[in-house]
């Protein structure tokens, strides 16, 4: 049974991804900043007759990432798949961003991706057919108003994807990324609720976002999880260095 490590597994896309990998027969390391959230998703997988272990991690902290990888490898003796999904939305345009905002966006999204990749890559190389999948974003591929730091951080993830693909293809490791559009998760809902005075305004804000999409609805975490599973397994065995948009046609048709 191949071992898959998923960061940010406690909610949203990460949670759906951990559950999807377990359903596909993988043993899943469910890593999250929240210990409770990591335990909850691992328990859900176990209740569905899958195999999972929870691990607490702060992906922006080098020592924490090292402990996560030690726990993951110690559980089953190796890693075949790593999904570097953990991230944080930081909103604000150039003139409203503080240096602390900028640093937080890069620390979690870009540095977190780098630290996860660097710590896990030796194990993917040792496996001989390892796969690393990053969660980027459509804002890494096209601009969107009001998310300067987040866009820069996710752009770094996209560039890192291509660079690692070039560096590690000769050693048997494929590196790809998924670039989701607007996905309805607890995090995205909380951001819109914070801007809304009441339920009607909340629903109006949600509708305003998806009005730009040729397929005019919010994406589901499970749909992104399917794309990640595709990129991480032999279903995509001749793909590396790709940034796969899953975004309802937003980038292609706008």
Image (spheres, grey):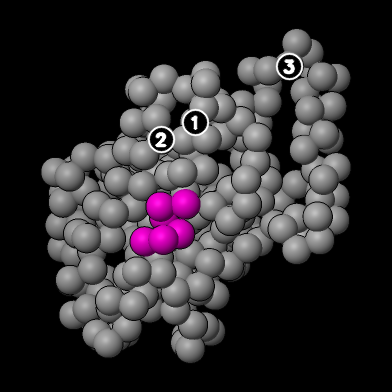
Q: Which residues are magenta?
A: 155-160
Among numbered discs 1 and 2, the one appearing first in the sequence = 1
**Is 244 on the left-hand or right-hand side of 123?**
right
Query: Is residue 9 among the parts visible in the rendering?
Result: no
Say which residue appears at 62% left-offset and 52% top-offset: 142
Q: Height in image: 149 above or below 180? A: above
Count residues near mark 3 (Cα–Cα under 10 Å), then give few for <14, some for 14-19, many for 20+: some
Query: Is residue 247 among the parts visible in the rendering?
Result: yes
Asked whether 137 or 131 is in front, the reply is 137
Task: For mark 1, give the secondary structure.
Answer: loop
Name the residue tied to disc 1. Answer: 90
Q: Is there a contact, CB below 8 Å, between mark 1 and mark 2? A: yes
Name the residue tied to disc 2. Answer: 105
Q: Residue 230: which quarter of the image?
A: bottom right
Name the residue tied to disc 3. Answer: 196
**Is 20 on the left-hand or right-hand side of 67?**
right
Say which residue appears at 85% left-offset and 19% top-offset: 200
Magenta stretch: includes residue 159: yes
How many numbered callouts? 3
Among numbered discs 2 and 3, the one appearing first in the sequence = 2
Quarter of the picture holding the C terminus: bottom right
Magenta stretch: includes residue 56: no
Q: Residue 214: which quarter of the image?
A: bottom right
């Amino acid at each position: 049974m191949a071992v898959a490590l998923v960061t940010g597994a406690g909610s949203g896309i990460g949670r759906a991804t951990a559950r999807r990998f377990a359903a596909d027969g993988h043993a899943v390391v469910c890593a999250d900043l929240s210990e409770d959230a990591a335990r909850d998703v691992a328990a859900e997988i176990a209740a569905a007759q899958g195999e999972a272990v929870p691990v607490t991690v702060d992906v922006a902290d080098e020592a924490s990432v090292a402990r996560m990888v030690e726990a993951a490898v110690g559980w089953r003796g190796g890693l075949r798949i790593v999904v570097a999904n953990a991230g944080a939305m930081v909103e604000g345009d150039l003139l409203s961003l503080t240096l602390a905002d900028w640093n937080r966006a890069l620390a979690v999204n870009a540095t977190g991706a780098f630290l996860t990749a660097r710590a896990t890559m030796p194990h993917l190389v040792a496996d001989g057919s390892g796969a690393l999948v990053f969660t980027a974003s459509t804002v890494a591929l096209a601009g969107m108003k009001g998310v300067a730091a987040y866009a820069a951080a996710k752009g770094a993830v996209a560039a890192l994807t291509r660079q690692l693909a070039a560096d590690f293809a000769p050693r048997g490791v494929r590196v790809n990324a998924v670039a989701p559009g607007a996905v309805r998760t607890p995090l995205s809902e909380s951001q819109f609720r914070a801007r809304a005075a009441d339920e009607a305004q909340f629903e109006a804000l949600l509708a305003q976002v998806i009005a730009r999409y040729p397929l005019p609805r919010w994406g589901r975490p499970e749909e992104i999880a399917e794309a990640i599973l595709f990129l991480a397994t032999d279903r995509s065995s001749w793909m590396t260095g790709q940034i796969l948009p899953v975004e309802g046609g937003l980038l292609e048709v706008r």
